[in-house]
């Protein structure tokens, strides 16, 4: 990717999309590379009492307090509660001027995929998947669901328990 600033619509330029692949509960998910600031591991996190289940906690990341969200909980794919240990990985994203970390089970590769290798999400998907995903990409051995990260975070309403 060049040093120029690219907008959300630019990730589909030239009939190609660039995604960072992550895994949650065995499902491959693609996040737009233009939305990702960094990838980091979480050694220690402070829980937030009575927070929404999507809020995993807070961390001090290079001198800044960062809210950590569980991407699996946001997408309603997390079967149980995600335990944070020294191997916990997060993807750093900026949204509305604030930095968030999205906890995922695994970080994969940055992929440049032709848009003709994808299809729209099937109409029979659940409400969350239909609203917050763009397309399904056919990979050699798997399917990768492209998440509309901006739509997901824009609609986020975290409520105290």
Image (cartoon, rainbow, N blue to C red):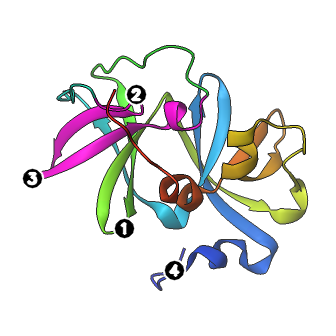
Classify mark 1: residues with Cα within 10 Å, few (<14), some (14-19) or many (20+).
few
Any magenta on residue 62?
yes
Q: Nearer the viewer, mark 4 or mark 2?
A: 2
Residue at image mark 4 = 2
- Is the Cβ of the residue at disc 3 closer than 8 Å to that at disc 2? no
Q: Residue furthest top?
A: 80
Mark drawn on residue 96: 1
From this view, report whether residue 84 is shown above or below residue 96: above
Classify mark 2: residues with Cα within 10 Å, few (<14), some (14-19) or many (20+).
some
Q: Work out whether mark 3 precedes mark 2 in sequence or the reverse, and give the earlier one.
A: 2
Label 1 residue SS:
loop
Residue at the spot 59% in from the left edge and 32% down from the top edge: 23
- Is the Cβ of the residue at disc 2 closer than 8 Å to that at disc 1? no
Label 4 residue SS:
loop
Q: Work out whether mark 3 precedes mark 1 in sequence or the reverse, and give the earlier one.
A: 3
Mark drawn on residue 53: 2
């Amino acid at each position: 990717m060049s040093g120029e600033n690219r907008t959300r619509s630019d990730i589909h330029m030239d009939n190609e999309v660039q995604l960072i692949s992550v895994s949650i509960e065995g499902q491959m998910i693609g996040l737009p590379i233009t939305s990702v600031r960094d990838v980091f591991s979480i050694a220690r996190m402070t829980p937030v009492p009575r927070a929404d289940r999507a809020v995993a906690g807070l961390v001090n990341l290079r001198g800044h307090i960062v809210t950590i969200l569980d991407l699996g909980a946001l997408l309603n794919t997390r079967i149980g509660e995600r335990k944070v240990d020294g191997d916990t990985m997060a993807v750093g994203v900026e949204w509305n001027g604030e930095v968030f970390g999205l906890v995922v089970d695994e970080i994969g590769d940055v992929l440049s995929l032709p848009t003709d290798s994808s299809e729209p999400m099937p109409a029979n998907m659940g409400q969350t998947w239909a609203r917050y995903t763009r397309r399904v990409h056919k990979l050699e051995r798997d399917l990768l669901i492209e998440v509309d990260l901006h739509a997901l975070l824009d609609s986020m309403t975290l409520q105290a328990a």
